[in-house]
Image (tube, grey):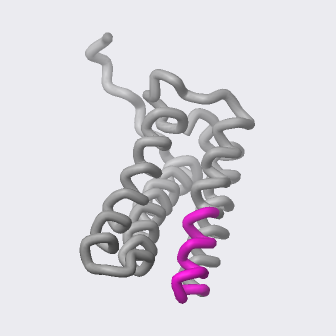
Amino acid sequence: MTSEPTPRPSGVAGVVLTIRFLTELALLGGLALAGSQLGTGVALAIVDAVLLPLVAAALWGLFIAPRARRRLPEPARFLVEFVLFAGAGAVLVLVGWPVSGIVLAVAGIGIAALTRVFAKDG
């Protein structure tokens, strides 16, 4: 490991990566919201609200994150991102948040695609 600082992306790549981070947070928040609506009781709703984002974060950390030890190659990495955002969007639609679900899915998948164009190793 070197002590050299990692260069920070600037310009369009920096903007895309910043928005990507925000969509990742929205993914986790959307899954927590959807999970809280899925349970039939308070205890199950809490478990779902914690479990859904936890599973998504684990998958992201294992296979998508830039420093993941088992980082998938393209296009498999994009496919996992696609499935996570589309799945979160679908679950939000199913629990009665259709606009939020569609916006999350479209924005997340769109930014994932833009990341491949403007921030190649993001």
Residue 38 location in percent, x, y?
A: 44, 76
Q: Start and end of the magenta stretch?
A: 87-98
Q: Which residue sits at x=26%, y=15%? A: 3
Asked whether 39 or 16 is in front, the reply is: 39
Give x and y (percent) for residue 101.
58, 77
68 relative to 30, above or below: above
Q: How many marks?
A: 0
* Quadrant in which residue 96 is drawn: bottom right
On the image, the x and y values in percent for residue 1 come to 32, 11
Most foreground residue, 116 or 75 = 75
- Furthest residue in direction front, as rendered: 40
Q: Is the residue 54 above or below the residue 119 in the image?
A: below
Q: Main secondary structure of the magenta part?
A: helix
Q: Quadrant of the C terminus?
A: top right
Q: Residue furthest top?
A: 1
Q: Residue 69's x, y, as percent?
A: 46, 22
* Residue at 66% across, 59% down: 109
Magenta span has 91? yes
Residue 87, relative to residue 72: is it above or below?
A: below
Residue at image x 56%, y 72%?
91
